[in-house]
């Protein structure tokens, strides 16, 4: 490996902040090592899913039903500013596909995610890949579920529909990075009435994934440091499990190499 910041400026400057510590080493015999701190407005904006009240789409080809909502992209916020305001959801409910519950199931969701990732990629000449992802994730979400009967529902939605994509090439290697947020909701059991859920969390993540050319992987994950608040309101007769998930999904695909996807 030969140079660092000058190579960063030459190959990564469109997406990585070379003045903030990003760098790039190139082994022209077939490998690279890149450390990318993304520029403001690159991946660090707020990704929001806003409930609209439109009917949910039924599942197709064995996929989970698509949760309701419209994607909005917002400006990045600092840690001392609330990620989003709490919204009234009762008028924004969407009817889940038939069969989600023996009676009916209505869902409304409003949430936002902000992720400031730092990605280190090391690809050597024989195709061994090491990917390290760290950064701060901010999440704030409110959900309303109204149900009647026995339910077995699992829905999800990736937003935006097309992941935000960044690509860079250096020497013999190109790397594609794809960022998308993922909302998930599970309702399982018997419920008659409504449940409101809300949660806000800021947490730091750090993970390392090592893959050989055959696709075998070793994963090292450090326990996240979490500060959060949450709430749950129930006006129902229920013996049901409700699970709400909201957060980023980052895929790193070196070529040549094996794609790696993380969902903290």
Image (cartoon, rainbow, N blue to C red):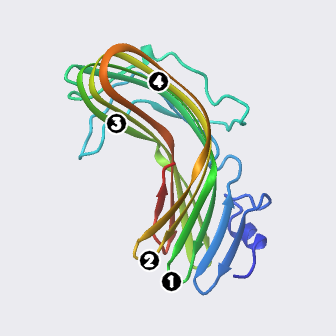
Q: CA distance from mark 3 to mark 2?
A: 34 Å
Describe the element under mark 2 as helix, strand or loop: loop
Which of the 4 quarters of the picture holds residue 236? Answer: top left
Q: CA distance from mark 2 to mark 4?
A: 43 Å
Residue holding disc 2: 213
Q: Residue at x 31, y 19 (%)?
A: 238
Which of the 4 quarters of the picture holds residue 244? Answer: top left
Q: Position of residue 101 (x, y in %)?
A: 23, 25
Question: Label 2: how many residues lie within 10 Å, few (<14), some (14-19) or many (20+)?
Answer: few
Labels 2 and 4 touching (C-beta < 8 A): no
Vertical comparison of 41 with 110: above or below: below
Labels 4 and 1 touching (C-beta < 8 A): no
Q: Position of residue 196 (x, y in %)?
A: 44, 20
Vertical comparison of 9 with 262: above or below: below
Residue holding disc 1: 126
Labels 1 and 2 touching (C-beta < 8 A): yes
Q: CA distance from mark 3 to mark 4?
A: 16 Å
Question: Label 3: how many residues lie within 10 Å, few (<14), some (14-19) or many (20+)?
Answer: many
Q: Quadrant of the N terminus?
A: bottom right
Numbered circle sitting on residue 155: 3
Q: CA distance from mark 1 to mark 2?
A: 8 Å
Q: CA distance from mark 4 to mark 1?
A: 49 Å
Q: If you read the primary sequence from the N terminus, does the residue marked by circle 4 or circle 1 appear first?
A: 1
Which of the 4 quarters of the picture holds residue 76? Answer: top right
Q: CA distance from mark 1 to mark 3?
A: 40 Å
Closest to the camera, between mark 4 and mark 1, is 4
Q: If you read the primary sequence from the N terminus, does the residue marked by circle 3 or circle 2 appear first?
A: 3
Residue 41 appears left or right of 262: right
Describe the element under mark 1 as helix, strand or loop: loop
Residue holding disc 4: 197
């Amino acid at each position: 490996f030969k140079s660092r910041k000058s190579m960063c400026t030459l190959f990564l400057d469109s997406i990585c902040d070379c003045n903030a510590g990003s760098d790039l080493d190139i082994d022209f015999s077939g490998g690279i090592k890149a450390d990318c701190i993304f520029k403001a407005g690159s991946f660090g904006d707020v990704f929001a899913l806003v409930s609209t009240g439109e009917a949910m789409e039924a599942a197709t080809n064995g996929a989970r039903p698509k949760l309701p909502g419209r994607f909005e992209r917002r400006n990045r916020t600092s840690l001392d500013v609330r990620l989003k305001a709490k919204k009234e959801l009762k008028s924004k409910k969407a009817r889940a596909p038939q069969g989600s519950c023996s009676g009916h199931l209505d869902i409304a969701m409003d949430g936002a995610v902000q992720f400031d990732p730092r990605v280190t990629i090391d690809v050597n000449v024989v195709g061994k890949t090491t990917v390290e992802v760290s950064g701060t994730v901010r999440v704030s979400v409110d959900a309303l579920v109204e149900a009647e009967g026995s339910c077995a529902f699992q829905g999800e939605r990736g937003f935006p529909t097309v992941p935000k994509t960044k690509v860079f090439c250096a020497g013999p290697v190109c790397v594609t990075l794809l960022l998308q947020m993922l909302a998930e909701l599970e309702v399982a059991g018997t419920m008659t009435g409504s449940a409101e859920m809300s949660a806000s969390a800021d947490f730091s993540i750090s993970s390392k994934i090592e893959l050989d050319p055959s696709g075998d992987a070793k994963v090292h994950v450090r326990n996240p440091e979490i500060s959060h608040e949450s709430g749950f309101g129930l006006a129902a007769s229920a013996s049901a499990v409700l699970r709400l998930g909201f957060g980023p999904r980052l895929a790193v695909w070196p070529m040549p190499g094996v794609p790696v996807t993380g969902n903290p």
